[in-house]
């Protein structure tokens, strides 16, 4: 996939080759080791699911989804809706040993044309919560969605729902932000948190989930040997290739302190929240190209490129507005590698030249730039007009 640009040097988007849409979800059974996920049937699953959910005696687990059913009619109507609905498309999570439904879930907001699908309406009984089966059920549903060809797998929740906010990143989702005042639920405001998992991220996430779910990861008492995060880090260390690459939203946690360090270098106060929001917007909107240098899973530096247009040259140019390397890596040639990669990427996109500005007293950077062929502008004076 390559970023496409118009004649003005404006980024138009990354190409999606041979896209023909995804397969609409089917009512299939997904078989795991500790559980299976089956199309919901009121007759087959209703009694067992109700019994499991009623183990939540005080009703606290219903706080963010819907009012708790109180009567037989409430349960009957809810289960009838689940059985009849196709979007959401509901499934029961069934314990492999007992055969009892111990939770439910659904695919929803299903858009095969655009390749987007969401997992939601999660009802985990006390029998399912914090169990191997809970993670395995989510893995089975993820795997099936990507096997059907979906490009984007979404997780949304009430931003006040702390367990759901923790579960999403644990399962490999990337936090994208909060839609403020997204809904009014039962007379109360709901801010909705958005998370996503992309098809390009699925292979690595699948490997981590499968490593954690492997029977060898649990002792005779069923206790995990390694956490899911530890499995993820171990696999990343095995497959990680050091070097320069394009940044993604998954890099936001490490990229934010680097960008904040760059801003502090130029006299700004420490402001991680502003730095994170700025970088997140650049990655979401695609109006800048960010290159990062990674070593052993850690980001060591970055540079950011903004598309411009030269009227005199009648050609696109890129502004290399940011270059920053973490202090421990500044003698390892990271800045040089980032600059060389930026130049090569610009040449691939037909950019006429790169431009940058640096502080007069930043002598180390000036030496680096000039060693790579950058020339100081002696023909033009640069001016700025401060607007705020």
Image (cartoon, rainbow, N blue to C red):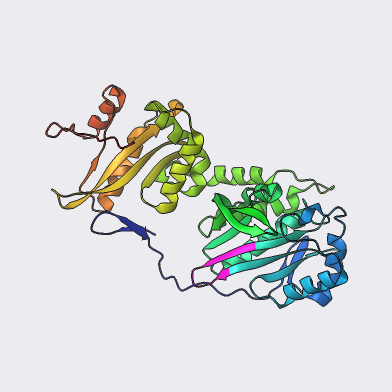
Left or right of residue 83: residue 179 = left
User: Residue 115 in magenta?
Assistant: yes
Identify the magenta region: 110-119
Q: Quadrant of the C terminus?
A: top left
Residue that protrudes farthest toward the front in the picture? 187
Residue 275 or 148: which is nearer the viewer?
275
- What residue sits 41% from the left and 71% below the top? 18
Is 315 or 136 nearer to us in this picture?
Answer: 315
Say whether residue 261 is visible.
yes
Q: Residue, x 68% and y 57% (percent of image)?
A: 187
Q: Nearer the viewer, residue 189 or 89?
A: 189
Q: Is residue 88 left or right of residue 357?
A: right
Instruction: Name the residue at 73% across, 74% down.
Output: 81
Q: Nearer the viewer, residue 70 or 244?
A: 70
Residue 99 in sight? no
Q: Quadrant of residue 132?
A: bottom right
Compared to residue 19, the image places residue 11 above or below, namely above
Residue in view at x 27 percent, y 45 percent: 318
Q: Position of residue 339 (x, y in %)?
A: 31, 38
Q: Is residue 362 left or right of residue 135?
A: left
Where does residue 32 sit, x and y in percent of width and height? 73, 63
By secondary structure, the bulk of the magenta-drawn segment is best described as strand
Residue 213 % position (x, y):
71, 54
Residue 288 in the magenta stretch? The answer is: no
């Amino acid at each position: 996939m390559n970023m496409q640009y118009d004649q003005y040097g404006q980024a138009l988007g990354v190409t999606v080759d041979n896209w023909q849409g995804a397969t609409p979800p089917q009512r299939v059974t997904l078989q795991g080791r500790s559980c299976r996920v089956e199309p919901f049937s009121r007759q087959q699953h209703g009694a067992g699911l109700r019994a499991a959910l009623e183990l939540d005696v005080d009703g606290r687990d219903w706080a963010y989804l819907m009012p708790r059913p109180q009567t037989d009619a409430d349960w009957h109507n809810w289960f009838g809706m689940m059985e009849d609905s196709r979007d959401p498309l509901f499934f029961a999570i069934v314990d492999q040993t007992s055969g009892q439904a111990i939770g439910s879930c659904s695919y929803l907001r299903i858009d095969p044309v655009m390749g987007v699908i969401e997992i939601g309406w999660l009802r985990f009984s006390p029998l399912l919560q914090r169990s191997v089966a809970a993670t395995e059920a989510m893995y089975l549903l993820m795997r099936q969605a990507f096997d059907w060809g979906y490009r984007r797998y979404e997780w949304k929740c009430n931003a006040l729902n702390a367990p759901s906010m923790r579960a999403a990143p644990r399962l490999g989702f990337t936090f994208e932000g909060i839609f403020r005042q997204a809904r009014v639920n039962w007379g109360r405001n709901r801010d909705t948190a958005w998370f996503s998992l992309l098809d390009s991220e699925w292979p690595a996430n699948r490997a981590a989930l499968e490593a954690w779910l492997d029977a060898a990861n649990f002792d005779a008492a069923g206790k995990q040997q390694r956490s899911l995060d530890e499995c993820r880090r171990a696999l990343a260390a095995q497959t990680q290739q050091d070097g320069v690459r394009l940044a993604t939203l998954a890099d936001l946690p490490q990229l934010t302190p680097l960008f904040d360090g760059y801003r502090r270098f130029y006299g700004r106060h420490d402001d991680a929240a502003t730095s994170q929001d700025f970088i997140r917007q650049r990655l979401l909107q695609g109006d800048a190209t960010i290159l990062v240098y990674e070593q052993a899973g850690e980001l060591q530096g970055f540079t950011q490129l903004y598309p411009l247009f030269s009227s005199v040259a009648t050609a696109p140019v890129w502004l290399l507005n940011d270059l920053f390397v973490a202090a421990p890596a500044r003698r390892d040639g990271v800045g040089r590698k980032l600059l060389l990669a930026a130049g090569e990427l610009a040449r691939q996109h037909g950019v006429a030249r790169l431009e940058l500005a640096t502080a007069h007293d930043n002598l180390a950077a000036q030496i680096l730039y000039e060693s790579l062929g950058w020339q100081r502008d002696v023909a033009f004076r640069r001016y700025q007009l401060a607007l705020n």
